């Protein structure tokens, strides 16, 4: 995927490809945002798309050695949109950033095609290593509001990251990740490339609540067993090297 993403970015700032990408971006926004009413409204008023368009130019400059102008342009976009995308980041086609305020995408992050990010998402690094230190996000991944995906990890395609999750380990394709730290849950109904965008990032399993309920049910069962006996069991033996006649209470 890395080679494909780099190839797409190298061509994205060429005039024909750049405007074709704008067309695709607006179409994807219409598909994924029920509040969108027209192409003109999206083109003029959607900061998530403006940030992506700025990034395509700044990334083009970055790849050609004009790193300072690329960084300057990315900071200008940050001031205008509230979205910070490092010009070194590799972004696929039809990335949709909904609302967008507070989104941060680090220098070595890689984002696949048809990814959706909500506001407050961070694709961040966890080390001072100059090499790959940010996440790789597969195609068609949805990352909910406030979620943090940290470190050089891979999020498999068609996965969903729940709102406010903190993800610090890789997840396979078609996973749902929830909680702090993120817990991986495999989907019962798989998401595929031809399916509608998976945007319901609040339909999430509560893995901790399930675990607590299971523990409480087990405690109730054990207490019921204890209540059926008037005396605790004594541990006795007929063999040497074993306890005899001593009662152990837990």
Image: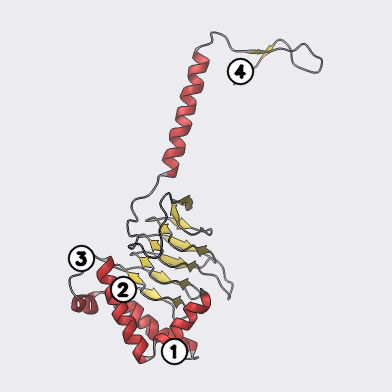
User: Looking at the image, is mark 4 or mark 1 earlier in the sequence?
Assistant: 1
Q: Nearer the viewer, mark 3 or mark 2?
A: 3
In 3D space, how far apart are the residues under numbered discs 4 and 1 (Cα atoms)?
73 Å
Q: Nearer the viewer, mark 4 or mark 1?
A: 1
| Picture residue at 36% right of the left edge, 66% below the top | 117
Q: Nearer the viewer, residue 27 or 41?
A: 27
What residue does disc 3 label?
Answer: 35
**Which element type, helix, strand or loop, lies under badge 4?**
loop
Q: Nearer the viewer, residue 71 or 216?
A: 216
What residue does disc 4 label?
Answer: 249
Q: Is residue 84 above or below residue 228?
A: below
In 3D space, how far apart are the residues under numbered discs 1 and 2 (Cα atoms)?
20 Å
| Picture residue at 51% right of the left edge, 58% below the top | 172
Q: Is residue 34 left or right of residue 90?
A: left
In 3D space, how far apart are the residues under numbered discs 3 and 2 (Cα atoms)?
14 Å
Q: Please rate how many residues cluster around mark 4, counting C-alpha atoms within 10 Å: few if below 14, some from 14 to 19, many from 20.
A: few
């Amino acid at each position: 995927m890395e080679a494909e993403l780099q190839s797409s970015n190298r061509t994205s700032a060429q005039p024909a490809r750049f405007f074709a990408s704008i067309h695709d971006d607006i179409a994807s926004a219409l598909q994924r945002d029920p509040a969108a009413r027209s192409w003109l409204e999206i083109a003029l008023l959607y900061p998530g798309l403006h940030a992506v368009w700025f990034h395509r130019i700044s990334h083009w400059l970055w790849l050609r050695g004009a790193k300072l102008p690329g960084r300057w342009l990315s900071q200008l976009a940050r001031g205008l949109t509230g979205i910070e995308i490092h010009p070194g980041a590799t972004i696929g086609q039809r990335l949709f950033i909904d609302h967008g305020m507070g989104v941060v995408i680090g220098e070595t992050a890689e984002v696949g095609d048809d990814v959706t990010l909500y506001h407050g998402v961070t694709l961040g690094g966890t080390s001072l290593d100059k090499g790959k230190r940010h996440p790789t996000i597969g195609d068609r991944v949805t990352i909910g509001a406030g979620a943090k995906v940290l470190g050089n990890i891979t999020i498999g395609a068609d996965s969903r990251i729940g709102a406010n999750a903190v993800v610090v380990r890789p997840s396979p394709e078609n996973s749902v990740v929830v909680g702090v730290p993120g817990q991986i849950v495999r989907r019962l109904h798989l998401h595929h490339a031809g399916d509608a965008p998976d945007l319901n990032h609040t339909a999430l399993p509560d893995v901790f609540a399930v675990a607590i309920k299971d523990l409480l049910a087990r405690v109730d069962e054990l207490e019921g067993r204890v209540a059926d006996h008037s005396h605790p069991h004594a541990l006795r033996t007929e063999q040497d090297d074993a306890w005899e006649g001593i009662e152990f209470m837990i």
